[in-house]
Each structure stands twice: as structure tokens, then as C-alpha cells.
Amino acid sequence: MQAAAAQTEKPDIATSVVAAMRQLGVVGLPRNYEIFYEALTGSNQELSLEVVSLSNRPRQEDLDRIARKYLPHINGHDIVTAARDTLAKELEDLAQLLRSERVHIEKYGEVLSQTSEGLNSKSVVSHALLKKVISVITAATTSTIEHGKQVASTLKDKSAELESVKSALEEYKLLADTDALTQLANRRAFDRRIAAIYDDNRSVMFSALILADIDNFKDINDHHGHPVGDKIIQVVADIFRKGAQEGTFVARTGGEEFAIIVDGATEAGLVEVAEVLRTMVAQTPFTAANGMTYGPVTISLGICMASQADNADDLYSKADRALYRSKLTGRNRVTTFTTVQDKPLKSWLLYRRD
């Protein structure tokens, strides 16, 4: 992946996705956007290769095949459709049930009303009439109580069914926001989380972004193959998961790239956090069962405080500039945006991405 020399900043990935789809005449379906997003970020090498192998005018059935193969959560469209249909049916059943209960109660009310009117119209109420009235009211009350019990039981069953639908949708949402390889949050979840920082002034004051990138990852893939590269990504992800403070948001944003959103830390504190992660990766042995060594594996990191940026895109861009400064000055190090903002970055624009 290379930064274009003729540009002053890297193109936005979303813009690149839309442009690629338009150029190929791909229909703007959500699953198609995700396929091209994954292909252009390089987070799934095999998916990227299959997309590249498609014709200049890829068929929708070919794209659907890729989605089913590499992005199983894309089938969540079927989950949502099924959930929608189930909800519609359950709500109609509930409405019918409540209409029935309303009619039943109205009839019970009519019985009481007619009985009351009948009693009031009699100057003398015989014992036989009272027995008949009591019998009618008792039967009507018993019927109403039994019907109410049935309604309550049915509502309980419907509630359980709706809870099941809710659980299925929550599971789908979790799956849709999770990176399949590392089980960290994915880029989609990260984009929402970083945007939310600028919805609250307090978050802007006390949040920060750390970007991390595995050094020389292309060489690792070239020398050892993508399965080894995937394993290394998983190990690094596990280090981030265990090394980050509880409640810290950690995501794999694509390929060998990771992002960490930290709340309530100073810049000095963030440097300490990043240094801990860098050291943990550098000290981890990356070896196969046969003793073959895949390392040393190191990471470079860039830090930017949210208060140093105008919005989410600006925050990401500035943390990315700090990350590239770490790359350009030798890798396996941590750099803050504070230390690079006044320095020229021409060489960064020409830098070849690992």
C-alpha cells in the first residue's frame, strides 16, 4: 500500500470504495460496500484477490458468493429480514389478542349493566331472580377470568418469542461490529466510536487515539505466507486486548493496522501505555511448532489527543502522521503528534507502506 506522491494527503477509504464501485458498475448494496471496503483496506487478502479476479463488470451473484464465503455476517441481511417478518407477525397477533380481550371485557360489562338495569326495574326482587342473576354474573366472571388467564399466558409466550428475536438481532449487531480474524472491534465499529468523541465536549477534552501498525508486515507475508501473517495479527491483537486498560476501545482497522481509543489519560500517560504495548510485542517470541522463527516482530505507534484535532477525520489523520513519523525514524517506536506537527512531512507522503 503506497501513499500517492502527487497528493498532499491520503485519500479517504470511503471515497475510494465508492469510486471503485462506480467504475466497475457495482450496485450500491450494503454488502457490496463492505466487500470493496475489505478489499481496499487489505484486511482479508484472499477476499482482495478474489475481487481483483472479477471481470470489469462483476456480476452480483459473484459478489454474493464472495460475501457468503468471506463475510458470513453479511448473511445478517437474512437475519434482519426474518426478524422483521417475525416482529410483524407477533405484533399483529398481539393486536388481535388485545382486540379479542377488549371485546370480551365489553361483553362482560354489558352483562353487568343489563343485570343492574334489570334489578333496578323490579320493585320486588324474588329469591329465584337473585339466584338467576348470581348464576349469570358468576358464569360471566368465571369466563372473563379464564379468558384473562389465557391472554396473560399468551402474552408471556409472545414476550419470550420477541425476546428471542431481540437476542438474535443483538448477536447479529455484535457479529457485524467484530473483526472475524481477531475478535476485536472492526473498522465499522471504530468509525462510530471515534465519531462519538466529538459529540461531547468532555470526550474531546479527555480522549485520545493511538494508532499502531506491525512493522515490515509485507515482508512477513512474502517470506512466510499469509496464514503466518494472519497468526501474527492474532497474537498482536491478543497482546493489545490484554495490555490495554479495562474499558479501552481496541479495534483492528484493516490489514496489520490497529486503533486504540483511550479516555481519561494525559499525553504522557498515553506514551506509557503505548510503550508497554510496543515492548510486549517486541518481547513476544513468534515461532512455529517446528521451532521456525517468524520474528522479530515489532510495531510502530502514533498518538494524538482529541483536543488537538477538529473532528474525527482530523484526529485520525494526525495520529496517522505521528505513526508514520515512527516508521520513518526507524520503526519500533512511539511518536506523539505534538512532536511532529511543526516538522515537514514530505518524506511521509512518499513512504511505502509496510
Image (tube, rainbow, N blue to C red):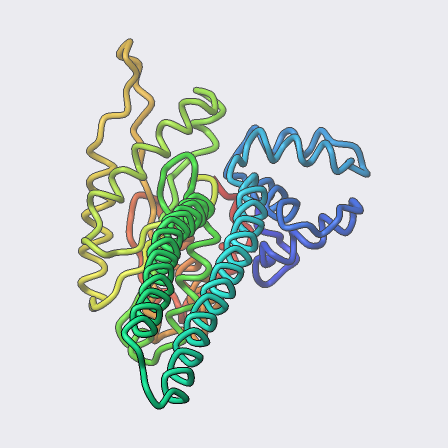
For residue 49, side relative to residue 292 (left or right): right
Residue for point 41% across, 29% down: 230
Picture coordinates of residue 21, whole percent (x, y): 72, 48
Could one spot residue 236 in this view of the protein? yes
The N terminus lies in which quarter of the figure? top right
For residue 340, side relative to residue 41 (left or right): left
Residue for point 51% across, 40% down: 73
Q: Is residue 236 above or below residue 86?
A: above
For residue 348, side relative to residue 81 (left or right): left
Picture coordinates of residue 325, whole percent (x, y): 39, 55
Picture coordinates of residue 166, whole percent (x, y): 41, 51
Location of residue 262 by image quarter: bottom left
Location of residue 63 by image quarter: top right
- Camera-side residue of 61 and 267: 61
Could one spot residue 210 in this view of the protein? no
- Camera-side residue of 222 and 27: 27
Picture coordinates of residue 107, whole percent (x, y): 47, 70
Q: Is residue 163 above or below residue 70?
A: below
Residue for point 32% across, 42% down: 299
Q: Is residue 79 above or below residue 122?
A: above
What is the count of numbered marks?
Answer: 0
Residue for point 63% across, 32% down: 66
Location of residue 141 by image quarter: bottom left
